[in-house]
Image (spheres, grey):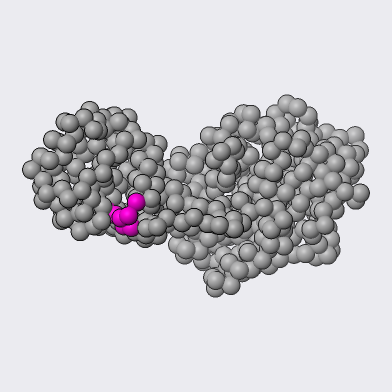
Amino acid sequence: MQYPVKSGDPGKQRTACLVLGVFARRQLSPLAKQIDQACKGQLSKLLKRGDMDGEAGQQLMLYDLPGVLAERVLLVGLGKAREFGVKQYRQAITGVVKTLDRGAAGEAVCALADLELQDGDLYRSVREAVMTAQEALYRYDETKSEVKKPRHPLKRLTLFIADRRRLKTAQKAAMHGQAIAQGMNLTRDLANLPDNICTPSYLAEQARKLGRKHDKLKVQVLDEPAMEKLGMGALLSVSRGSRQPARLIVMEYRGGKPNAKPVVLVGKGLTFDAGGISIKPSAAMDEMKYDMCGGASVFGTLRACLELELPINLVGVVPSSENLPDGDANKPGDIVTSLSGQTIEILNTDAEGRLILCDALTYSERFSPALVIDIATLTGACIVALGNQASGLMSNHEPLAQELLAAGRQSGDRAWQLPLWDDYQEQLDSNFADMANIGGKGAGTITAACFLSRYTKKFKWAHLDIAGTAWRSGKEKGATARPVPLLTQFLLKRCGQAD
């Protein structure tokens, strides 16, 4: 899919379809008014007939409009102008792209990117147009025997900007949007695969494949003997219940100065989580293939940074395993020793994500990181607290937390900060080990982060709990690719590339 940016006279655009916006009460958008003048008021006359009044979700396809070179003109309802923001804009773009992809146009010029948003600027609107269009066109067909494709799929969506002086900003936004969208699609593809395909070894091979495509990406995969030699007892205790061997996937991108400290992203890569001996209920257990979405988001973020060739050093660390019940699986009451030397009493084998993450966090010390962010579908408690609107955020460094919160607001991929007070640490007390792996019923998301914080004392660290945001359930079931937009925005800002 191509997303060129153009400016000029909208009426002189030779295209199969020109997309224009109409606000509520038949209020033409600025570019729609220009077209109305070019066709001597035909748009106004058509709207007065009552077929469309500009309510959100409405569409009206017109053909052979006089004075306009476009073969078709698609009018799109936008709702009230004073309420038109990013949310309404995304809905409009989604509807347009789906209509065009089902139709016969094949390509179009979209003038919606030039609209004024109540909560965004030109850069945001263009970037959102590309990302939203890519999401609307995304289809998972990897494991389907028959794939029904559109007869005339949409192949090019030109984003039209009236002011030529703003072209550079718009082109930059389109480039960023396309790179983030490609990263999000990689995350979706990996996350949507079933576990009998997307095993820890499969994830490792996808990392190697990414490394072969990009010279600046160095990939290393540690197998179980290598991890055992290092002393990763917490991570390896989880994989004992599975026939699939664990892998520690390390991807190093060196785009910045040679001596600059890297940002390290640690993503939970549990390719399937049945809960182990503390087995989960069977209802919706198929969705536990999404327990590797943290790892998948690290892949997607790296992919976006590689496409943009960001001037930053970045390391992705993905500990990957399955968590299944078996004669050799972890049992409640077992005590394991982590890479840091700290011992852990396992009171619930379904709290396994923190066991693979703690060893990966300790491993990250060897990179002398500027900061470390871990991303994990870690706790159901986060869904109870925040639903699927925001990811949970906790950090041992307040400026880092504020950077991530700002990146979430700027990208529309929001997070919400929860406390990480020492008062919660005592819930992890154990009579038999340095700590327990669960902290009881109260504050489950926070005590999980408290557990991880014990392995992050040597660097600035933030934790993103994406249990509620990483995938959708029900009829629209599928990976969302969050928080790739948040993480990429954060990295763009850190290396001075964000608008």
Q: Is residue 420 above or below residue 68?
A: above
Q: Residue 58's image quarter?
A: top left
Q: Residue at x 78, y 29 (%)?
A: 440
193 relative to 33, above or below: below
The quarter of the rendered structure image containing the N terminus is bottom left
> In the picture provided, is 230 more to the left or to the right than 159?
right
| Residue 276 spot, x, y in % from top left | 82, 44
In the image, residue 238 above or below residue 247: above
Q: How many marks?
A: 0
In this picture, which residue range is highlighted in magenta?
A: 103-109
Is residue 124 one of those drawn in magenta?
A: no
- For this orientation, the residue located farthest to the top is 442
Which of these two is toward me, 488 or 90? Answer: 90
Q: Is residue 498 visible?
A: no
x and y, in percent, of residue 25 in the image = 22, 28
Q: Nearer the viewer, residue 281 or 299?
A: 281
Q: Residue at x 28, y 50 (%)?
A: 110
Place of residue 450 in the rendered image (x, y in percent of width and height, measured from the top left): 71, 37
- Residue 106 in the image: x percent, y percent? 33, 58
Which quadrant of the structure image shows residue 281? top right
Q: Is residue 390 left or right of residue 444?
A: left
State whether residue 192 appears in this view: yes
- The structure residue drawn at horizontal position 59% and vertical position 58%, both measured from the top left corner, is 145
Whether 12 is drawn above or below 478: the answer is below
Q: Residue at x 30, y 55 (%)?
A: 105
